[in-house]
Amino acid sequence: MGCLGNVLWFVFGGVFSGLSWCLAGLLWCITIVGIPVGMQCFKFASLSFFPFGKEVRYGGGAGSLLLNIIWLIVSGVPLALEHAAFGVLLCITVIGIPFGLQHFKLAQLALMPFGAEVL
């Protein structure tokens, strides 16, 4: 089911959510200071392209908290709103519920990505 879900996800809109993470990563990589943040965005872009069969475990420390606060102010809110809006739209239909739940997972990740580990 994971492979079929990932293919359907990618074809029917997952490519756009992954590209939005890539755009955020490119914007962060413009500055030398933002390169670690941009690399994290690229890691989560791969998750956003193919989210089925993967889970996110949260952890981290004080450094992650500081980066999450900066991230939330600069890039986190637009990405989280994008995923939340798509999640609500997809959960309207019964067929779209699994895809909507994946968007909600990515919206949570967009709010606090640092200290998160993709399994």
Image: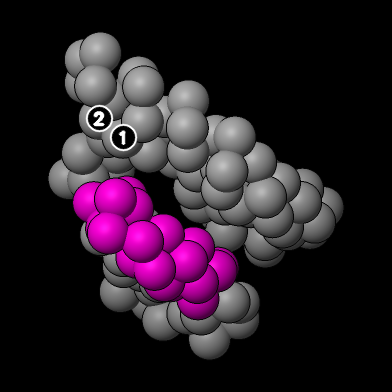
Q: Nearer the viewer, residue 50 or 16?
A: 16
Which quadrant of the view contains residue 82? bottom right
Residue 45 image position (x, y, % from top left): 37, 65
| Range shown magenta | 17-37
Give the quarter of the image for residue 4. bottom left
Placement of the N terminus among the 4 image quadrants: bottom left
Report the disc number at residue 51: none
- How crowded pointer 2 is (Cα within 10 Å; few <14, some 14-19, many 20+) is rated as some
- Quick check: is 32 in the magenta stretch? yes
Q: CA distance from mark 2 to mark 1?
A: 4 Å
* 45 drawn magenta: no
Location of mark 2 (residue):
115
**Residue 53 in view of the camera:** no
Q: Nearer the viewer, residue 26 or 43?
A: 26
Contact, CB < 8 Å: mark 2 with mark 1?
A: yes
Question: Considering only vertical position in the picture, is 108 above or below 49?
Answer: above
At mark 2, the secondary structure is: loop
Q: Quickly name the residue at label 1.
A: 114
Question: Which residue is located at x 58 percent, y 77 percent?
Answer: 16
Q: Position of residue 37 (x, y in %)?
A: 32, 50
Location of the C terminus by quadrant is top left
- The percent coordinates of residue 118 (x first, y second) are 22, 45
Crowding around mark 1 (Cα neighbors within 10 Å: few <14, some 14 to 19, many 20+) is many
Name which quarter of the figure residue 73 lies in: top right
Which residue does the image show at 80% across and 56% down from the upper left?
89
Does 59 appear above or below 84? above
The x, y position of residue 74, in whole percent, is 57, 43
Residue 82 visible within the image: yes
Which amino acid type is marked by label 2? Gly
Q: Secondary structure at mark 1?
A: loop
Mark 1 residue type: Phe
